[in-house]
Amino acid sequence: MEAAFKVLPLAFPKGKEQFCEICQREANLQCTKCRVTFYCDSEHQQADWVGIHERICQMLVPIRTPSLKQSRRKEKQLMKVKAELIEICRNTAQSKLSQGKHFEALPAAQFCLRCCIDVHGPNTIQLVPAYLLLAETNMGLGNLALVADLLSQAEWAILKSPECDRSLRQRLHRSLGRLHTATGNLEAALFHFANDIYYASEEFGVDSTVVCYGYFLMADAFIKQGKMAIVHSLYTEVAFTWHRHLTKLLETHLQSIRNPAMLDSSFDYSQPSEVDEMFRVILEFEQKSSRRGSSLIAHVAHCLSMLWFVRGDPLKVFGFGTTALKASQLTPEHDLAEPIQGLLQLVQDPQAHPRSGPS
Amino acid sequence: MNAAEARGPQEVVLPKIKTDSGNQRSPQYRFRSSSKQFVCVELLQDGNHKTFSELFSLLCLDKDQRNSLHPDTSTLRAPLLEEQLEKMETIKLHLSRAEQAERTGSWTAVCEQRLLLGLHFSAPEDVWLALYFFHSCADRKHGGGSRAATEARACLADIYLRRGDLEQARQQGELCLRQAEDGGWLDSSGVSLKLRACLVLGKTYGWLADAQLAASDCDKALKLLHKGHSMSKECDNKLIEAEVVFRFGLTHQSSGDQETAKQFFNTCIEIYNSLQNRDEIVKVLKAMAKSFEKEGNIEETVQCLEKSADICRSSGLPSKLADICLCLGNIYYKTSQYVKAYKCFLQGYEVACEAGDVALLQKAQVMVGCSCALPLIRTYSSDMESASSATVKRLVAWKESRGHQDLITDPAE
């Protein structure tokens, strides 16, 4: 647990007020470890400590301690520390976001942006990733007005630099699409998701999982418009594409179990909660809908089953596998039954089962 | 986008999100993005994601094809598909209709739209698109047996036949025929699809038989020709029938059955007579003469060739006439009637000059020379074979006395 001093105004140069790290209001507390970070109350200090401060506390000391001698070497060193800080904050925020901990991600995302502005200056293209990260965090917390502000800053920066790369544009459009979906401006949301998918197709290929997630988000807007036929079509596309990817992944995974030297880490685990959530939503939608597309249900359940196999949770593999098997028997062509049964057998066979999946 | 642009960078006013709704399809956006992006985004906004991914893949394919070509040739070719907004718009229109039909499960409408696209891309540089859309129409799991899919197969068979891909043409033609027989459909311009299938198959079988004949596999050739004949009867097309009958004749000729071959040639001449096609009659008569020649019936051979020469003269076919003259000359030449041969070759040479056919002209020149030279040598040919001193003396005497005079007096000049 972190400790705090009370801020004594007389301990600082005259006229230099200290502000809270989290809310920028007048500060009353000071971190005892680095002595360069201030808070308005213990609640904010606690939030910052859990969010990011614990990791970067000591790194802040050289940056925030004013020095009389401004040598070039020292400046270079400081820049290096700042770049390192940005990297740490970004990674921390991202990993907390992918675990769904939006509130804990906030301090890291905020500090990341602040540090970026410090290094690159205001309104530069380098700020865009930081803006997007902070916007995403605030989206999770429901601060839509703030999100809108952050995204227009990002948009302006991108508009000013036409040579900016496609993946950045893609991420901006995705965030804008989500914002507009949340505010109920569905036409605008569809426009941004369309651009998101277009850029993602250019960058990652038309059958990539990035494009798939774009389709999934787009389907949400179509649900709100009541266009269920389109939603079904989009979900089918998502499920079938993921099914292909996961089938391939499972194959290489099984090979690497037999031959551990081949262990590959090509699969992106960075957003597991997002993927789970996506499959869960699709499954629910399809089970509730009147048409009950058993082929789609079978594919999604099989996807989940394969995903949990790779992650190493036999119980979930078994649960989703049985759902998939049941659904696949309702489809006219039972082409899925065989791979599903193969998977279920693998779970019962302790030799083939991975010793430990990634946590 | 618009909100941020209007405000400028420094203000920190919240953008009014609601006000720019519906503005997204503005011309402003159209100019700011490439036409490819414009078309793709519109497709996605309407939820036609399958059309999007199909179009996107087609555009990529087009680019890859272009990049794999030699850089010099690519500059001469038509612009990339992604630079041709009109074509992309057409694909977008019909494929979106197809996708909407697919969502409601009306498979025939899907095929109709794809067929329309295939028919639209009829220009030679768009053949790859036509092939793609016809295939995507004909090879569908749902609706593959519909009228549109059958017409697509007929079009595919036509394209493959034109490209000389006979096996593919045959496969598509046979499938088309089977489907058309069940359906009894007409194509978009009102022609019976069955008729179209028979027509293309008749031609294809004929060409395939040619290939077998070239590989001297007469049995396979005959089998193909029988199929071709029934096709030509089916579509009641005399021209194709005559071609098939002619090929029958050729096949029998090469298998050594001259009697049957001549019968076929006669039938063929009858058909061409009814069609008033003199051009082809000359061709058949020439083939018939060959059969007579193989039998050793020189008289009939000459008669045949004379007849075809007459037809050529009366209907003004100089290059054919030259060819026939050379054939006739060859017959005389082979039977050692050098004077007659010389006359024929000379005539052939003159006609070829008139027709301006250089290849034939050169051939005729050589043959005229040969037919002049051979009779000269012939007087002494027995002397050359025997090796007595008397004959050698005679030959030397001839060589001395002949001088250069004989060589220069070329009868052709």
Image (spheres, coloured by chain):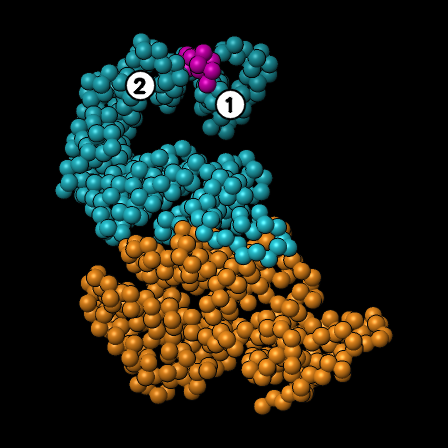
Chain colours: A orange, B cyan
Q: Mark 1 lies on which chain?
A: B
Which stretch is magenta?
A: B347-357
Badge 1: how crowded within 10 Å, few (<14), some, or many (20+)?
A: some
For the residues marked 2 and 1, what is the alpha-carbon distance in whole angstroms? 53 Å
Q: Is residue B355 magenta?
A: yes
Residue under numbered circle 1: B391
Residue type, mark 1 in image: Thr
Residue under numbered circle 2: B279
Residue A97 horizontal/vertical position (percent): 49, 73
Badge 2: how crowded within 10 Å, few (<14), some, or many (20+)?
A: some
Q: In this view, does A226 lie to the left or right of A11?
A: left
Does A165 appear above or below B372?
A: below
Which of the 4 image quadrants contains residue A83?
A: bottom right
Total labels drawn:
2
Looking at the image, which is closer to me, A139 or B69? A139
User: Are discs 2 and 1 less than 8 Å apart at CB?
Assistant: no
Residue B342 horizontal/vertical position (percent): 42, 14
Is there any visible trace of residue B379 in the rendered image? no
Q: Is residue B61 left or right of residue B236?
A: right
Magenta part, dominant SS: helix
Residue B319 horizontal/vertical position (percent): 40, 17
Taking the spot 40% from the left edge, 41% from the top edge, the residue there is: B128
- Give the number of the disc on residue A226: none
**Between discs 2 and 1, the one toward the N terminus:** 2
Q: In this view, does A96 lie to the left or right of A258?
A: right
Looking at the image, which is closer to me, B171 or B85? B85
Q: Is residue A70 left or right of residue B89?
A: right
Mark 2 or 1: in front is: 2
Q: Does the magenta stretch include residue B303?
A: no
Residue B372 horizontal/vertical position (percent): 47, 16
Q: What secondary structure is marked by label 1?
A: helix
